[in-house]
Image (cartoon, coloured by chain):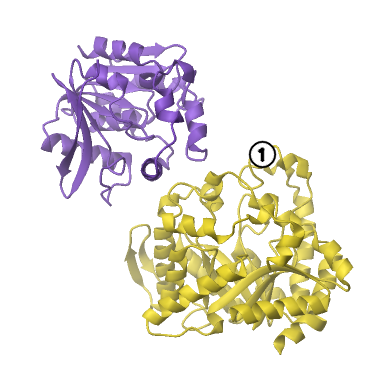
Chain colours: A purple, B yellow
Amino acid sequence: MSTQFSEEFLKVGNDKIQMFKGGSGDPLLILHGAGGNRGPLRYAQALANHFTVYLPSHPGFGKSDRPEWIETIQDLASFYTWVQELHDLEGVRAIGFSMGGWLAAEIAATCRHAFSSLMLVNSVGIKPQSSEIADIFIISPSQIAELTFHDPKQAPEYHQIFEETPTAEQTDMAERDREMAVRVCWRPYMHDPRLPHLLQRVSIPTSIVWGRQDRIVPLECAELYHQIIKGSELKVIDGCGHSPHIEKPDEFVKIALDFFS
Amino acid sequence: MDVFYFTEMPYTEFPESEVEKYPSMRLTFPNTYFDANKAHDLFKRYLDEYQYAEEVGFDGLMINEHHNTPSCMNVEVNISGGILARITSKAKILMLGNLLPTSDNPVRLAEEIAMLDVISGGRIISGFVRGIGIESWANNTNPVYNRERFEECHDLVIKTWTTPGPFRWEGKHYHYRAVNPWMLPLQKPHPPVWVPGTGSPETVQWTARNRYTYAAFLTPLEVAQGLFQRYREYAAEDGWEPGPDKFAFMICCHVNETEEKAQEAGKAFMWRMNYPLRGPREYWSPPGYMSKAGAAAVAARRPTPLNEMSYQELQDKYHLVVGNPDSVIKKLRHIKEQLGIGALLLEAQGGPLSHQDTMRSLELFGKEVLPALKD
């Protein structure tokens, strides 16, 4: 059963950000990854049956404005606490995917009241010690798509997301998204040396969810997040790559509903 | 019209079959194939050839800089500039160029170029380049800031050369407390600045606004004409008219005793037209490196990429001029007439072109071609 999502534009200072919103119930904030805001996919629709789902496009992504001053993930985190303050989104449940998880971790690490509970899914942000995060900027978008999935055939929306010919507008948006990701993630690449230290203060319920066969962000990063964040749970999904919410949406939603209820 | 001699100082002695195994010769082809002893010998010949080029009458000597590629061993243009400053005495030294965006220390860069200008007796032409995409990867400079860093680095270098120190600088990318080097350029207000381009409109505009010389690199003649025309339009908007000294053009060129010998030896240039120009789009154009207008201009620049052109096509399209002295003179004169340039940059050593062929070519340039072009 699909839920209607609306598209809104929220004012934040002199800028506006694009926000997809749908469902009913307690708010659930979803922070997308470096690949951009794919909108209310199947997993989001399912979650919208239990929560009011907020799915913003980060500044510089999608149809959101790009404030000149935003250059780092930490700047994005500061911006989001402002969004939360202005639009009554403080103390909410939050999910962050990949770069969005890094962003969510930064917010939680600096702002005690930002979230009531937090789920980090295949998230960057902590530098692995014995493995490496794949350099997604030096490869093509189609190579990234290939790296993202363990088995694309099990992703119900794979065709609609990756195999349909994009419009000129979609291509432009994808390039702009990629530039913004490069802007904030370039160096140190996909990590913040401070984060392991600041995460020690996080004491909200936290779930680390990981597709085991992630060829972009190694499982070691899941273990590092799990070790550092006190009381966190670690759920590894077998036979799944970097994007469980797309590759195994039903299993992912079940884990999310178990955690957030 | 000044004529410059140029080589990228390539290292070609490894099996080409190995390159096929990698996405590109640039950036990620492993440096395990680099033999420092071979490189030592190569530098000896390349530097001897530069000295000989001055001796036979080239007005200038051009050097460039690239990273992570066998096609150019010149990884620091200020080092080779320093060498030329001492082993030559008359020719202009065109450094085309220093990579501004990858510089983390524009003041140091200003000091280095000033030192070269002083030691050379005021012969430096200071080229400033944005760098091809590869340089962003190799130096890990964020490509989205490429143009901003280029412009701020430039502004700071020029200020360092022309404003009495000490002064402070709190910019977006660069910050200094006491800019006051005891090294300023000999040429006043500063060495001439040249900027190379292959089509990006922003580069033409910036160069024209600053009244610097624009050097079109390996573009088709009509594209070069179009770029120079745009330069003239920007200049007109600012109320001035550029002379030929504002326009330069680079091509590959080999002259030999007979047409047959030239055509045979000239095939060496196919090496530099092949692997060094091939690679994934991301290598050449990292995200954020080029504006949409720039990308469109580059795409429109030539319908067939250089690395897909045959030896004959490259000659027909004036990317490569090869022949006996008469045919080379004729073709270079044609370029001069078509483009109205003040400087012709001849890449006269390329790929595996031997020391013997290079020296013979330089000798013939000196004896026949350069004097003919002076008329």
Q: Tag count in the figure? A: 1
Residue B255, how many percent across, how many down? 81, 72
From the viewer's side, name the closer residue of B26 and B253: B253
- At label 1, counting other C-alpha atoms closer than 10 Å, the crowd grade (few under 14, some 14-19, many 20 or more) is some
- For the residue marked with disc 1, what is the amino acid? Tyr
Instruction: Tell me where residue B86 sits by quadrant.
Output: bottom right
| Left or right: B266, with B279 as reference point | right
Q: Is residue B210 visible?
A: no
Question: Residue placed farthest to the bottom in the image?
Answer: B375
Residue ID for mark 1: B22
- Identify which residue is drawn at 58% across, 43% down: B280
Residue B154, how many percent across, how many down? 44, 67
From the viewer's side, name the closer residue of B242 and B97: B242
- Identify which residue is drawn at 62% across, 57% down: B75
| Left or right: A260, with A148 as reference point | left
Q: Element under label 1?
A: loop
Instruction: Tell me where residue B57 sits by quadrant.
Output: bottom right
Vertical comparison of B332 with A19: above or below: below
Looking at the figure, which quarter contains the C terminus of chain B? bottom right
Q: Is residue B19 visible?
A: yes
